[in-house]
Amino acid sequence: MPKGDLLVFYQHRTNRNGKPWIQPKKTQFARTLGLLPDDVGVGQGPQIASDVVIFFARRTAEPAGPETERCGDAAIPKPSVKAMTVESKPPAGSLEEILACLNATKTRATYGAVAAIVGGTARGIGQRLGLRRPEASWIVNKRTGRPSGYAPTEIHPDLFKAPMISEGRELHALLERWRAR
């Protein structure tokens, strides 16, 4: 999203069985854009449609490069998945935790297996990974065993020697073993 652009996102209530849904979606939208949740506005018209909100955000600074992410108007360095230690593990069950686990264990997992853990669809996982990079190339297409749309320079050099997990339960078991180490 280039500097100065305004992005508006229309969202129907998600099926959360009566649980709050606006704040989690606001946080997800902000995170996708590399912003803080406070940088995202919410428009509602409960008298007109109580099950719809509109999220909006304006990029006020240049987008971050591949080694940085946005925090408001500041570009901050992204932590390297390789640099994460037991003390700095990402939240359990998050896409970041799965990437850290797959990198540490040099294991491929299909988009579908990852979606079974983090939620959403297999097709949406690639978008949620962000920039194509070797650390994210462990998540692959079930049929080809390759990450979709990656150039050779964006693929981890050990990828094709790695075993592949294609079921969510298998990935869950790997995560449990990795957490316990």
Image (spheres, rainbow, N blue to C red):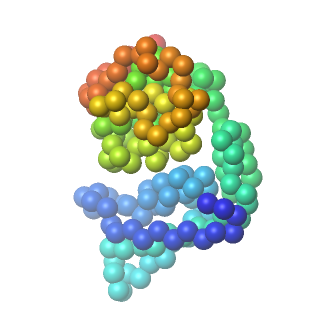
Q: Which image quarter is the N terminus in?
A: bottom right
Query: Relative to 17, does residue 67 appear above or below in the rendering?
Result: above
| Foreground of the two, 147 or 87 | 147
The x, y position of residue 113, in whole percent, is 31, 33
Q: Residue furthest front?
A: 152
Q: Quadrant of residue 94?
A: top left
Query: Relative to 123, does residue 6 appear above or below in the rendering?
Result: below
User: At 54% across and 52% down in the image, what residue appears?
Assistant: 31
| Foreground of the two, 110 or 92 | 110
The x, y position of residue 47, in whole percent, is 36, 86
* Residue 61 falls left or right of residue 87: right
* Residue 161 falls left or right of residue 37: left
The x, y position of residue 81, in whole percent, is 58, 28
| Residue 117 seen in this snapshot | no
User: At 31% across and 31% down in the image, what residue appears?
Assistant: 142
> How many labels, in total?
0
Q: Quadrant of residue 76?
A: top right
Q: Residue furthest bottom?
A: 47
| Residue 131 seen in this snapshot | yes
* Residue 76 falls left or right of residue 126: right
* Residue 86 falls left or right of residue 95: right
User: At 53% across and 24% down in the image, what residue appears?
Assistant: 156
